[in-house]
Image (spheres, helix red, strand yellow):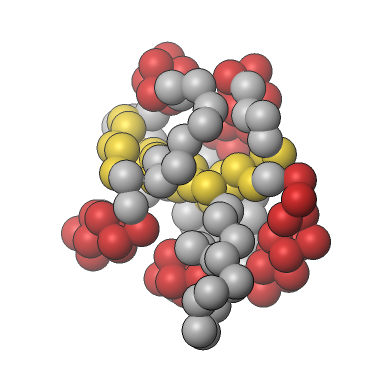
């Protein structure tokens, strides 16, 4: 059975990586919001989640788009998280990483080669 990968593409700004995910043998599902991702996670838990870190200072109770997602998957330590982040938010992202596990973190601009390397490492550990 193929490992499942959930790709959450909210802002984009990087290459379409779906063909890469499929070439590496993942069964891929793509959603375009955290809300849809949380709905997906109610019915199934993928082995890998790929998402973007978006710092947002206007949130009342969180600092980014990922806290709710990470709280949901922290009961599933087998899920590997790959996060794309902007260099200008590296310090904020690091504080999030201190609270929640991230298997791979890729700084923008994300390339297909970087993603292939990260997923190859993850897949070998599955």
Q: Residue furthest front?
A: 58
Query: In this picture, is 88 found above or below 119?
Result: below
Asked if residue 33 can be seen in this view, the reply is yes
| Looking at the image, residue 94 lies above or below residue 26 | below
Residue 119's x, y, as percent? 57, 31
Given residues 5 and 17, the one toward you in this image is: 17
**Residue 100, image x and y in percent?**
62, 68
Q: Residue at x 56, y 55 (%)?
A: 54
43 sits left or right of 90 in the view:
left
Instruction: Pick the residue in front: 109 or 82.
Output: 109
Image coordinates of residue 37 in percent, x first then y, are 31, 55
**Which of 78/92 is in front?**
92
Q: Is residue 88 above or below residue 98?
A: above
Name the residue rendered at 59%, 47% in the picture.
83
- Residue 41 position, x and y percent, is 29, 59
Q: Is residue 76 visible?
A: no
Q: Is residue 97 left or right of residue 120?
A: right
Q: Is residue 93 left or right of residue 23?
A: right
Quarter occupied by residue 42: bottom left
Tell me the residue at 59%/38% (across/down).
Answer: 122
Q: Quadrant of the N terminus?
A: top left
């Amino acid at each position: 059975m193929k490992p499942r990968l959930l790709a959450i593409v909210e802002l984009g700004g990087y290459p379409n990586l779906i063909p890469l995910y499929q070439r590496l043998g993942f069964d891929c599902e793509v959603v375009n919001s955290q809300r849809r991702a949380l709905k997906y996670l109610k019915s199934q838990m993928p082995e890998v989640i790929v998402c973007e870190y978006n710092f947002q200072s206007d949130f009342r109770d969180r600092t980014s788009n990922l806290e709710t997602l990470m709280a949901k998957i922290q009961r599933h330590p087998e899920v590997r998280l790959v996060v794309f982040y902007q260099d200008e938010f590296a310090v904020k992202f690091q504080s999030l990483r201190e609270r929640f596990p991230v298997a791979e973190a890729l700084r923008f601009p994300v390339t297909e080669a970087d993603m292939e390397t990260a997923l190859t490492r993850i897949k070998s550990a599955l």
